[in-house]
Image (spheres, rainbow, N blue to C red):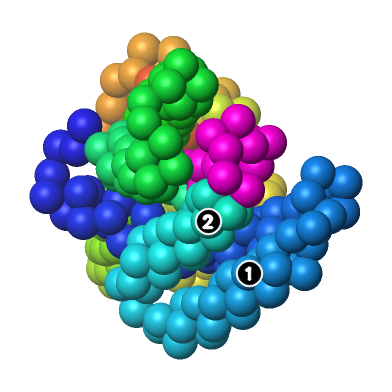
Amino acid sequence: MFSRQGDNEQFRQETQILHHHRVYYILLVGMAVMLLFTALDSIMAPEYFSEFLLCRLFACGIGALLMVFNYYDREHRNAWIIGFAGYICASAVIVLMIMRMGKITSPYYVGLLVIMTSYTAIAPLTAPVTLISGFSLVCMYLAGMFYLEPLSLSLFSNLFFMVCFVCIAATQSWADTAARARECDLRIAEKTAADKLADQADNLEIEVRKRIAEQESSERRFKLLYEAITDDIVLVTRQGDILQENESFQQHFGDIGGSRFIETVSQKDQDKAEKMLAEVIEHGRSKNAYQLTLCTQTGASIAAEINGVLLMRSNKVLGVQLVIRDISIRRN
């Protein structure tokens, strides 16, 4: 039923805690049954009313004392002993009542079945412990009845029904224990999965932070390199709109982000510039040493050599990067 020793230990601890809490209900139910039988005494055995009442009050006093013991059982180690003691005490009182009436056919026999059913139904017992508890009551009843009279058909009939109740209670305890064990296994599996998921989430978060830090570091290095290049660099869209430019480009042409690159080209070379961009975008080929005449922000014309590269990511066009070099001195 359990895959690991740790699971078995956790189930045992959970059962101890559950048993500790249910002992209160076991004792309260037993005390209530004792007091309810007082009403039956007034009808079935009025001559024993006072005597039986004292016995039941004594049993209730023991039940209250056991509740105190259970309250101070902080480590939940004695729950079964306390609950079993209350069960035996209530059973002994009923057996004594039957013996006092002097006949096996006493109607108080049903009280034994009530006590047995209440105890085995409330307490989280295993099947073997339920059998031990049930047959302890059977033996107690059998010993008391032997004291009254020899074996009889009535005694055999009562024992038969008691044994049937014990077997039914043991079956129920087995089913309840198996169900609680499965629930415990599921909780452990869920907790293990949740812990693994939390670890994976932490690792993923660490990896994401690491990747972000690496990307930011790479972007800073690229930006420093981008700004340190003496050539003019500009990134334009497929439509020719300027997305980004470096400091050198801004010194020559001004901060014209969002404008069209074609506006920096002299009138006579604008068709050539548009053709160059179209070839780079449509064919994905780099254009090297493409010469155009550009107009600076002061109105001066410069001869420029342009290298165009198509930038893509995940088969998606990001834009065209243009590296512009002033070759006016070379021409002169």
Range of residues picked out in magenta: 101-121
Q: Residue 25: x, y in percent?
A: 62, 60
Q: Residue 291: x, y in percent?
A: 36, 37
Quarter of the image for residue 274 reads: top right
State the residue lying farthest toward the top: 283
Residue at image coords 36%, 26%? 151
Q: Earlier in the sequence, mark 1 or mark 2?
A: 1
Q: Which mark is residue 4?
A: none
Residue at image coords 30%, 51%? 11
Q: Nearer the viewer, residue 196 or 236?
A: 196
Quote the CA–CA distance across marks 1 and 2.
Answer: 9 Å
**Left or right relative to 133: residue 106:** right
What residue would you read off at disc 2? 96
Can the viewer see residue 30?
yes
Q: Nearer the viewer, residue 184 or 292?
A: 184
Is disc 2 placed on a helix, strand or loop? helix
Check the image and report above or below for 23 versus 156.
below
Residue at image coords 70%, 68%? 51
Q: Residue 259: x, y in percent?
A: 68, 48
User: Quick one: quadrant of the N terminus?
Assistant: top left
Q: Residue 124: x, y in percent?
A: 43, 47
Can the viewer see residue 327?
no
What residue would you read off at disc 1? 55
